[in-house]
Amino acid sequence: MRRCLQLAANGLQNARPNPMVGAVIVAPITTHHSPLTTHRIIGEGYHIRCGEGHAEVNAFASVKPEDEALLPESTLYVSLEPCSHYGKTPPCADLIIKKGVKRCVVGTIDPFAEVQGRGIQKLRDAGIEVMVGVLEQECQWLNRRFFTYHREHRPYIILKWAQTANGFIDDHGHALQISNAVTQKLSHKLRAEEDAILVGRTTFDREHPQLTVRHWSGTDPKRIVLTHDRPLPLLIDDLYQQGIQSLIVEGGAMTHQSFLDASLWDELRVETAPFTVCGGTRAVTIPAEARLLSSKCYGENMLNIYTKQCL
């Protein structure tokens, strides 16, 4: 299953809005030199691009002709429940049944309304042994955007800001360069991985941010400016209706606080520089329910990433 997750992560940019999925086919091998049965991977694949073959399809396609005879005794490992419906491609559950594998190990159930256990049931009805819940948390974390979108009916929301060592995000109201060259590239990498990016009207008018991926490669996220005449719940619902699965909120402080007050956040990314200023706009306070996920230095700047305690 860990190999499935490694493979799945390769689809980070191109698989969306579909989830990232990896699949591995393992066959028992008995040799003349040993009475013990060993196992080896005879096929593997991942969902490369939305609209193209799913992970299971690519895994079966990678099996060499001489290994086809091993499929009836093989186990298919897949990080997300095989689909059971016709979308842009046929149901993967049907293909698995057709290939005749003996067993299927699933990382987690698909939260998409047209699947949600139906793929697993279809396999079991066909006589295939199915195990569910292997590395379940890791599998759900990899597709946290997809899971949040389908479970909460809203995008996965990342609040992001850079602050001085004494907690200011500007210098007496004037824009301040806090990020360094490396963390700036990381910010643009993040933009390439998410669907949309939002700033408040004050930040937009004062700083005129481009909100692009110019220091990275990929597609620019959809740009959004939050205004007072557009209530936050209505905005979030609009983004859901548009199929936006993830949103970066880059500020400013009042905008961040409005998301925190509404408990509309899933991840915090806080960059802290080593220098101080005498005054300015204070960064928001990290909420009590935030759990530190990682902490790493890039040059002299520290990047802390938090999630909610429930994750």
Image (spheres, rainbow, N blue to C red):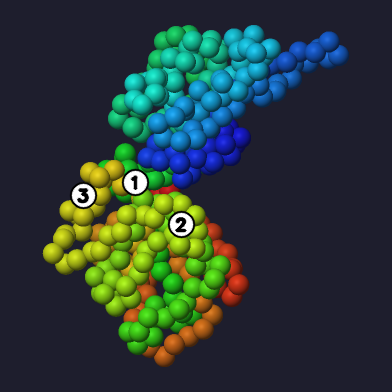
Residue under the point 44% across and 38% down:
15
Q: Position of residue 83 (x, y in %)?
A: 40, 24
Q: Which residue is mark 2?
A: 190
Which residue type does callout 1 highlight? Gln
Height in image: 231 above or below 144? Answer: below
Q: Which residue is mark 1?
A: 245
Residue 253 occupies which quadrant of the picture?
A: bottom left
Q: Is residue 142 left or right of residue 113?
A: right
Residue under the point 49% across and 67% down:
184
Q: Is residue 146 visible?
A: yes
Label 2 residue SS: helix
Extreme residue toward the left, this view: 229
- Assess disc 3: are there few (<14), some (14-19) or many (≥20) residues with their C-alpha within 10 Å of its C-alpha: few
Which residue type does callout 2 highlight? Leu
Residue 111 occupies which quadrant of the picture?
A: top left
Label 3 residue SS: helix
Q: Position of residue 306 (x, y in %)?
A: 45, 59
For the residues labelled 3 and 1, say whether their Cβ atoms are less than 8 Å apart.
no
Which disc is residue 137 wearing? none
Extreme residue toward the bottom, this view: 278
Residue under the point 24% across and 70% down:
201
Distance from Cα at disc 2 to Cα at disc 3: 22 Å
Front-lying residue, 80 or 61: 61
- Assess disc 1: are there few (<14), some (14-19) or many (≥20) residues with their C-alpha within 10 Å of its C-alpha: many
Q: Position of residue 135 (x, y in %)?
A: 53, 36
Which disc is residue 238 wearing? 3
Residue under the point 65% across and 17% down:
64
Distance from Cα at disc 2 to Cα at disc 1: 14 Å
Distance from Cα at disc 3 to Cα at disc 1: 11 Å
Which residue type does callout 3 highlight? Asp
